[in-house]
Image (tube, grey):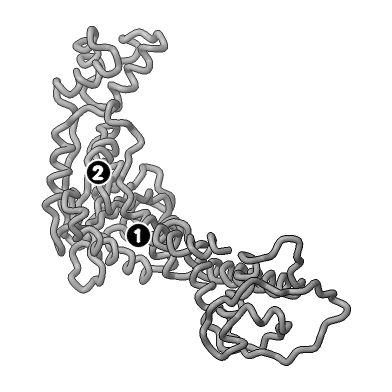
């Protein structure tokens, strides 16, 4: 018990610093709450009450000698007047008896019973607080902020991505974006590498939440994935993320504003125009409207020209076009896929689009002729 009591503060501090181990923290809170209970009537044997100087002599609080506890049967219990004790002296008396027990002597079974009930009370109180905290709004917001603040990691490793100028353009846009600026939309031809370019620009950036808009009414699904209840809680999470990004710890981060990355696939259910209408309204409110309580940079990656044209954002949008690869970029991509010797022939037959070049490399590995690939 002493080891547990001494390690509770350490566990609580570690839980606060690492954002982990909530159960030890709340067990410590429960123990502190139990020790601060008002006075309670406890019935002690005369011999057992000698363990607490405060109980017998009205003060002092020092342990006097070893225990004189006699072997007591549960059937025949000597009568003794109730003694007024706080919870802390009673528990201290039990601890002292355990520490100074005389060999070949048996402790009073009632002390074991009281001690077991006290420990059970601590455990039940701690578990109750832990379950209450697990379903609280505070925990939901804290976990959502933690998801936001995790460094963004794309699906592809850095070794699989060719450096492109458009990636630098996207990063420059993200770093220079300020409050009440226009929302950003990244568009381009089919298989031009839009998604890879956006993800590479966001690599390692904190304060990014990515969501794929697959249905017309996509906001509830986004809230559920993030772990928040509604728009008000989502706005509160954005404000907390913004406050964290302004700290010195994140001074080297690419941006000091939260980024909401909305990926619009080609097969969005409900129609592209209907889905993009809500995306446009959200981008205008969060990025451009000064009345919105939580500002965020909305970054839209449109996979089709129809989605890009349907995105309006109240007439306030910043366009980034992802075109075909340059000759140098295409050669680097083919070199990465071990087709450097035939790079010129592949580019002449398949063009400069990133997706086409990757598909051509995979088909060449399967033994398909270049003329058939063209």
Q: Can you say whether 63 is above or below 17 in the image? A: below
Q: Residues within 10 Å of mark 1 (few under 14, many from 20)?
A: many
Residue 110 drawn at (x, y percent)? 75, 75
Asked whether 131 or 336 is in front, the reply is: 131
Picture quadrant where residue 329 is located? top left
Residue 120 drawn at (x, y percent)? 66, 69
The quadrant in which the N terminus is found is bottom right
Q: Can you say whether 361 is above or below 287 in the image? A: above
Spatial CA distance of label 1 from label 2 is: 18 Å
| Rendered residue at 34%/14% (across/down) | 373
Residue 345 drawn at (x, y percent)? 22, 10
Picture quadrant where residue 17 is located? bottom left
Residue 174 visible somewhere in the drawing: no
Left or right: residue 123 versus residue 136 is right
Asked whether 85 or 310 is in front, the reply is: 85
Q: Which mark is residue 202?
A: 2
| Rendered residue at 19%/37% (across/down) | 322
| Rendered residue at 25%/32% (across/down) | 192
Residue 286 drawn at (x, y percent)? 24, 64
Q: Which mark is residue 326?
A: none
Q: Residue furthest right?
A: 75
If you read the primary sequence from the N terminus, does the residue marked by circle 1 or circle 2 appear first? 1
Q: How many marks?
A: 2
Q: Residues within 10 Å of mark 2 (few under 14, many from 20)?
A: many
Secondary element type, mark 1: helix
Marks 1, 2: nearer the viewer: 1
In this figure, which residue is indicated by the disc labeled 1?
145
Asked whether 146 or 80 is in front, the reply is: 80
């Amino acid at each position: 018990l002493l080891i547990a009591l001494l390690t509770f503060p350490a566990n609580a501090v570690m839980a606060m610093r690492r954002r982990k181990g909530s159960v030890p923290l709340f067990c410590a809170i429960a123990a502190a709450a139990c020790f601060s209970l008002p006075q309670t009537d406890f019935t002690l044997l005369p011999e057992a009450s000698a363990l607490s100087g405060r109980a017998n002599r009205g003060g002092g609080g020092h342990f006097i000698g070893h225990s004189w506890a006699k072997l007591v049967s549960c059937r025949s219990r000597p009568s003794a007047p109730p003694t007024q004790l706080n919870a802390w002296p009673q528990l201290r008396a039990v601890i002292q008896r355990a520490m100074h027990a005389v060999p070949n002597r048996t402790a009073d079974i009632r002390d074991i019973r009281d001690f077991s009930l006290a420990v059970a009370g601590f455990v039940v109180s701690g578990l109750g607080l832990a379950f209450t905290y697990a379903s609280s709004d505070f925990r939901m917001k804290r976990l959502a902020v933690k998801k936001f603040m995790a460094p963004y990691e794309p699906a592809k490793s850095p070794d699989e991505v060719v450096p492109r100028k458009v990636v630098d353009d996207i990063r420059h846009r993200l770093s220079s974006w300020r409050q009440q600026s226009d929302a950003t939309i990244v568009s381009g031809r089919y298989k031009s590498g839009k998604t890879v370019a956006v993800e590479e620009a966001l690599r390692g950036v904190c304060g990014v939440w990515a969501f794929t808009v697959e249905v017309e009414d996509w906001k509830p699904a986004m809230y559920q994935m993030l772990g928040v209840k509604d728009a008000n809680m989502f706005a509160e999470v954005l404000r907390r993320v913004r406050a964290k990004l302004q700290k010195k710890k994140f001074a080297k981060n690419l941006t000091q504003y939260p980024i909401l990355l909305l990926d619009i696939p080609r097969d969005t259910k409900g129609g592209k125009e209907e889905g993009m209408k809500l995306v446009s309204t959200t981008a205008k409110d969060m990025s451009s409207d000064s009345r919105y309580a939580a500002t965020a940079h909305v970054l839209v990656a449109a996979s089709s020209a129809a989605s890009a044209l349907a995105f309006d954002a109240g007439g306030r949008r910043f366009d980034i076009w992802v075109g075909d690869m340059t000759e140098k970029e295409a050669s680097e991509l083919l070199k990465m896929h071990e087709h450097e010797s035939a790079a010129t022939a592949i580019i002449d037959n398949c063009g400069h689009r990133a997706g086409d070049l990757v598909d051509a490399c995979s088909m060449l590995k399967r033994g398909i002729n270049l003329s058939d690939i063209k």
